Structures are given as C-alpha cells and as structure tokens.
Image (cartoon, rainbow, N blue to C red):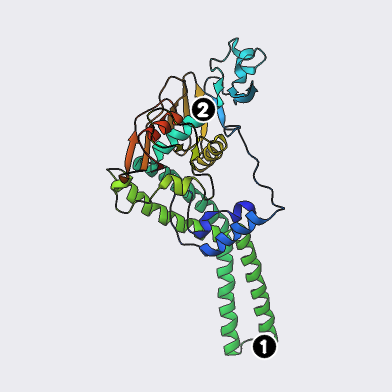
Amino acid sequence: IGKLLSDTTYVGRHRLGVKTDPIIEEEVFKRAQGLRKSNKHLHPPRKDPWPLQGRFRCSVCGSSLQRESSKGHRYYRCPGRTLTSKYYLETGKRCTVTGLRANDVEEKPLSVICDAMLRPANFAGALEKSIDEMRSVIADLERDTAPLEQARSDVKEELKRIERSWIKGRLPEDELRGMEKDAHARIERLQAQLDAVGTEDLERTRRLIQAAQRSLEMANSAQGGWWSHPEAPPMWFSDVLIPPGWPSGEFVKEEIPAGCTYDTFPPIDPDHIARTLTEALNRLQAEVWASPGQLQQKGTIDLSVPSTDNTPVPGVHLKAEDSYGSHALDIPSTSSPRTARQALRCGGVRRYSHF
C-alpha cells in the first residue's frame, strides 16, 4: 500500500522522467504524502548502510559479495576467496576479487550513474529498454484480457438480440426479463475478472509508452546535450532520480582551509548516498558486478566503474551560483567527491546542483 501511495506515476511522472496524463490530482497526492509523514504509527524506512546488498556480484566466481565491518570501516568481500567456498572446492583456486571498501564502491557507481544519465544517448537507451518492458507487460495483459473482452462483447450482442426480441414480441416479457437479468449478471462477473487482471494498468501502460516515445524522440534529437535542447526536462537527475523530500546537500559549517573565501560547503552524507544509490539501481533495474580493478553496472544501461583507489572518478557537472550569478560549471576528474566540493568552495561557489 505504501508503494502505491508514493507512486508518482499516478500524478503523471514515470520513473525515467516521462510525463503522462495524471490519474489523480497533484494536490491529492501531496496531501496523501503529508498524512503518511504525520502518522506517528507509520515507521520510517530502516536506514540501510549497505545499498549493494543482494545486488553486488563477483564476475570471477559468480558469488554474491558479502558485507563485513571491521574497526569502524565497511567492506564488501567475495566468499569465493575462502578455502571452504564452492569456487575453491571446484577449482582449487581462490577468487581474485579482493575486499572492496564500501564507501568507494557506493560513491563511484552513483557518480558514474549521474554522469551517464545526463547524456541523451544513455537516457534514450534507458527509455528504449523501458518501452520494450512496457510492451511486454501490455502483451501479457492483452493475452489475459482478450478472452474476457471477447466474452463481454458477446454478452452485449446477446443483450441487443434480447432487446430486438422484446420489441418484436417474439418471447413472453417475463422470459425476456429473465434472460436480460442473466446477461447483465454475466457482464458484471466478466468486468470483475477484467478489473482483477488489471485493465487500468493496461491503459496506463499504453499512455506511458506514448509519452516515453515522445521523450525518446526528444533525447535522440538532443545531439549537443540535454541543455542545448529547448524542450529538455530541467534537472533530470535531481528532479526524477531523487524523490522529493530527500536531503539535497544542505550546507554545513566547517573549518575554513587557507585560501577559501566561504565557510560552508555541502557535506557527504553516507545515508543519503546509500538511499540515492538504492533508488538509482532500482530505477535502472541494475546490479553491480566486481572484477579485479573494475566494477560493471548491468541493467537498463551498462556502465563501467573504476574500483581502485588511485583511479579518478568522472568529472562533476554542476550548475553553480557564485558572486557572478548562476552558470554551468565542469569540475575536472578528481579522486573523490569531497575533493570536488572543496575545489568548489575554494573557487567561491556558494551553492550548486547537479544538472
């Protein structure tokens, strides 16, 4: 029920930013969210510091990586390295994927996802897969509903024949009324079966496909990047991938390094990273696969992610505000998101947002 109440598709927003006709009014949706938040008996979601649990696999031996904490640090380790593992017993070798620091393998995929989904070609690829999946859903629903739709159509034709027989006086009125009552009862039963199968989902999915195809056409025409396209949806990542109400990098006061002109910059919130990465992987239907020195995200779009500490992550693309106003800003590849944020602060940037 909670998932249904928070599903933005009902107000016209699909998970990939596709706009479609809303089923309920935005105000009703917002009121429902407010009631959920104010309900003291509704427990908040459990904080999960392990966003890759259950979706982090080893490319060498195929095992699911296991979480481990040691001296205040979190790691993901491959069980294929143990002498009792199935991989060792079958091959006589230990898996070559060593332990991975959780912070690294959680921050870097998220950074790469942000960067990749800002590229129209990748966005188009995600949309194409989403459209294919929705078409598959429609095919399944149509296969289930077609016999019921045909049966309902047959009963409606039968009602028309009953009406013609009544007009021409071919059968006694009592007999005609009994036949009519029976036909209406069958229509109600068939409609209940159709509702159970999900005819509303069928129509909603058809509308989503139409809307997704329009967005796909826009993505394919945005050759110079999203922000050169006059109809591009603003702030795709922050508005679509991150649900409303999540932390957005509020500024906190910290000690000012030499040469910096402002005393605030966004913190790195591990809980925020965990929730955002979980949501990103859910939306892209992705798993992360580890091999020596590299991670691979496999899902709606496939992405390679460096996993070694000395390998830079992609550059950070931001919309920044400084004393000269608001403008686009590219931060070169850095060793960590914190380094990028320190560079922003030293450059006089007070506020920023991904775009």
Residue mark closest to the camera, 2 vs 1:
2
Please state which of residues 75 and 20 is positioned toward the viewer in this rendering: 75
Quarter residue 75 falls in = top right
Is residue 189 found left or right of 153 in the rendered image?
Answer: right
**Could you tell me which secondary element the residue under label 1 belongs to?**
helix
Please state which of residues 142 and 341 is positioned toward the viewer in this rendering: 341
Q: Is residue 283 visible?
A: yes
What residue do we see at 52% from left, 33% from top? 287
What residue do we see at 56% from left, 40% from top? 275
Could you tell me which quadrant the C terminus lies in?
Answer: top left
Disc number at residue 105? 2
Q: Position of residue 122 (x, y in %)?
A: 38, 40
Q: Indicate whether 209 appears above or below 258.
A: below
What residue do we see at 64% from left, 75% from top? 184
Disc number at residue 173? 1
Q: Is residue 199 visible?
A: no
**Could you tell me which secondary element the residue under label 2 belongs to?**
helix
What residue do we see at 69% from left, 83% from top? 175
Name the kind of residue labelled 1 in the image.
Answer: Glu
